[in-house]
Image (spheres, helix red, strand yellow):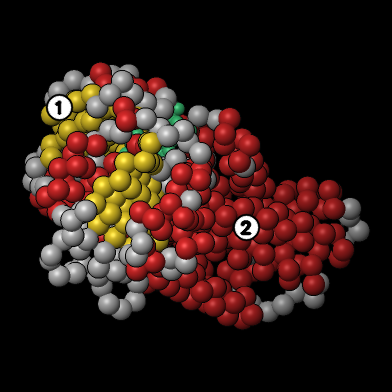
């Protein structure tokens, strides 16, 4: 074992970037929730408590819907600090809250109006749809949201191809437009105040502009600027391949080791499919490299890419970077193809690093030669742990044996879900403080 002599660098004093990012996100939400409350009170209360509740749930359901857009806008400031995986997870749970709030809105309003008329709830709903502007649009919007919610439930997600689920999910934008026009046409808060209406338009305009900028304008601009192309395709073993991509002016692409892109290779048969793959080497201003294991048709097809193929790459995304370091020294733990961002991070890390690479057999240890060279060059340490995929191979005792001072280090972890869960459990047992633990899951939508 050798140790790096360089003085520790790379840690940042002050508030952690993740905390800043989350504080920013919740500040936006809470500030708008407060403004909505003011406009709601200003509009006056209905005499019927069910209608009051119906209006409140409708307002906050819609506000959360706008917040949902911000969560998936892929704005670099939030993404670098919070990470796309956590943002999409938050989006997922907020999405279910939106669904329940809007269902509650429909039920409260229908029963509230039914109470003051002689109609039963079903006929009341039909009556509202026929006589009140925007209600029919709201019913259609709610139906769309229910379908999107149903296909996003875990059992449905597992059965649907990612692209099918994503396509259905895009209908949410139709629901957004229908819900917004319903609110400004029928919502008492907005019909009674032009200031409230202007504010609400600004909220929705801002949320849609964020999505437009983050998901369309920025990727288009970056791809026009860099014009990415495949320069080499190198098999690492029977299942894993590395793809080298170059482009114009790559030094100006703000990518960091540990981040990933959504890669769309513009071949005749696969241009419609974009897959997330991490950079498997730190970007050097000339080349980007991804290393992909065969999981389905998309990743299997990478092996047959031709040199010169045009690439549309969205990103860089992700918070699995040295921006989040809290300690001078680090432990990097990789399982299987989770080695890709770990290999890139090792290049960029300062301070002493211990790399633990967990694979079933030596043959599975892709990029092992590169890791060895880097470790030698950086005075770091490398442990290759082989054997069948049982969780206790990285049990607390084993981790403490390999890295006795693990509680004083940052831990970067990426690997298959069971291995990651086991290691996260071990780290908890060993008492590694949570802010020192950074991980990337190779799944975005939970
Ligand atoms: C942040 C991140 C980084 C990743 N980095 C690597 C890496 O460096 N090397 C590697 O081998 N694998 C990586 N993966 C996993 C890789 O993205 C999937 O194995 C690949 O997309 C599978 O696509 P497929 O068409 O071959 O298989 P499919 O059968 O089409 O997909 C298999 C599963 O992959 C996931 N998936 C497919 N497309 C997408 C998408 N556009 N967005 C989100 N999830 C999707 C879905 O969960 C899907 O069910 C990463 C995943 C994520 C989320």
Q: Is residue 136 left or right of residue 385?
A: right
Residue under the image location 32 percent in, 41 percent down: 384
Residue 40: x %, y % from top left = 62, 75
The image shows residue 9, relative to residue 172, as above or below, that is: below
Judged left or right of residue 116, residue 80 is: left
Which mark identifies residue 232? Answer: 1
CB atoms at circles 2 and 1 under 8 Å apart? no
Label 2 SS:
helix
Nearer to me, 41 or 316: 316
The residue drawn where x is 30% and y is 78% is: 14
Find numbered disc 1 in the image and state the secondary structure of the residue it sits on.
strand
Tell me if I can see residue 358 in this picture. yes
Q: Label 2: how many residues lie within 10 Å, few (<14), some (14-19) or many (20+)?
A: some
Taking the image as four quarters, which one is ligand 1 found in? top left
Q: Single out the mark in the foreground, 2 or 1.
A: 1
Kindly report the distance in space between the C-alpha atoms of the residues bearing marks 2 and 1. Answer: 46 Å
Compare residues 279 and 332 and report the one nearer the observer. 332
Q: Is mark 2 within 8 Å of ligand 1?
A: no
Give the mark count.
2
Whether residue 434 appears in this view of the structure is no
What residue is pinned by disc 2?
Answer: 97
- Outermost residue toward the right in this view: 118
Residue 230, percent from left and from top:
17, 29
């Amino acid at each position: 074992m050798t140790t790096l002599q360089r003085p520790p660098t790379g840690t940042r004093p002050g508030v952690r970037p993740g905390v800043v990012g989350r504080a920013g996100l919740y500040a936006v939400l809470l500030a708008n929730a407060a403004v909505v409350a003011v406009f709601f009170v200003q509009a006056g209360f209905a005499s019927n408590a069910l209608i009051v509740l119906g209006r409140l749930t409708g307002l906050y359901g819609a506000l959360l819907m706008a917040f949902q857009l911000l969560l998936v806008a892929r704005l670099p400031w939030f993404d670098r600090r919070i990470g796309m995986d956590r943002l999409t997870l938050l989006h997922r749970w907020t999405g279910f809250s939106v669904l329940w709030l809007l269902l509650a809105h429909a039920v409260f309003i229908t029963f509230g109006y039914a109470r003051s008329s002689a109609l039963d709830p079903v006929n009341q709903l039909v009556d509202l749809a026929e006589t009140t502007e925007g209600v029919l649009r709201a019913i259609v919007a709610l139906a769309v949201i229910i379908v999107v919610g149903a296909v996003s439930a875990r059992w449905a997600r597992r059965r649907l191809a990612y692209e099918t689920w994503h396509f259905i999910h895009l209908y949410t934008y139709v629901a957004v437009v229908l819900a917004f026009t319903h609110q400004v046409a029928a919502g008492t808060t907005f019909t009674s105040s032009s200031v409230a209406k202007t504010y609400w338009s600004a909220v929705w305009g801002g949320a849609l502009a964020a999505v437009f900028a983050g998901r369309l304008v920025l990727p288009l601009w970056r791809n026009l600027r860099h014009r990415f192309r495949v320069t080499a395709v190198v098999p690492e073993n029977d299942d894993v391949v590395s793809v080298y991509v170059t482009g114009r002016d790559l030094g100006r692409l703000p990518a960091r080791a540990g981040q990933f892109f959504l890669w769309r290779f513009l071949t005749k048969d696969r241009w419609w499919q974009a897959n997330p793959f991490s950079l498997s080497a730190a970007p050097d201003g000339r080349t980007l490299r991804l290393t992909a294991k065969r999981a389905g048709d998309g990743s299997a097809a990478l092996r047959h890419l031709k040199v010169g193929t045009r690439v549309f790459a969205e990103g860089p995304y992700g918070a699995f970077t040295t921006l989040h370091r809290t300690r001078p020294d680090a432990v990097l733990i990789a399982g299987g193809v989770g080695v890709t961002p770990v290999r890139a991070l090792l290049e960029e890390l300062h301070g002493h690093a211990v790399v633990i690479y967990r694979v079933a057999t030596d043959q599975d240890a892709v990029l092992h030669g590169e890791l060895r060279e880097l470790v030698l060059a950086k005075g770091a340490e490398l442990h290759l742990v082989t054997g069948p995929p049982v969780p206790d191979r990285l049990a607390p005792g084993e981790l403490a044996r390999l890295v006795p001072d693990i509680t004083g280090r940052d831990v970067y972890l990426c690997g298959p879900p069971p291995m990651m869960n086991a290691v996260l459990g071990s780290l908890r047992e060993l008492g590694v403080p949570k802010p020192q633990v950074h991980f990337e899951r190779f799944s975005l939508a939970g």
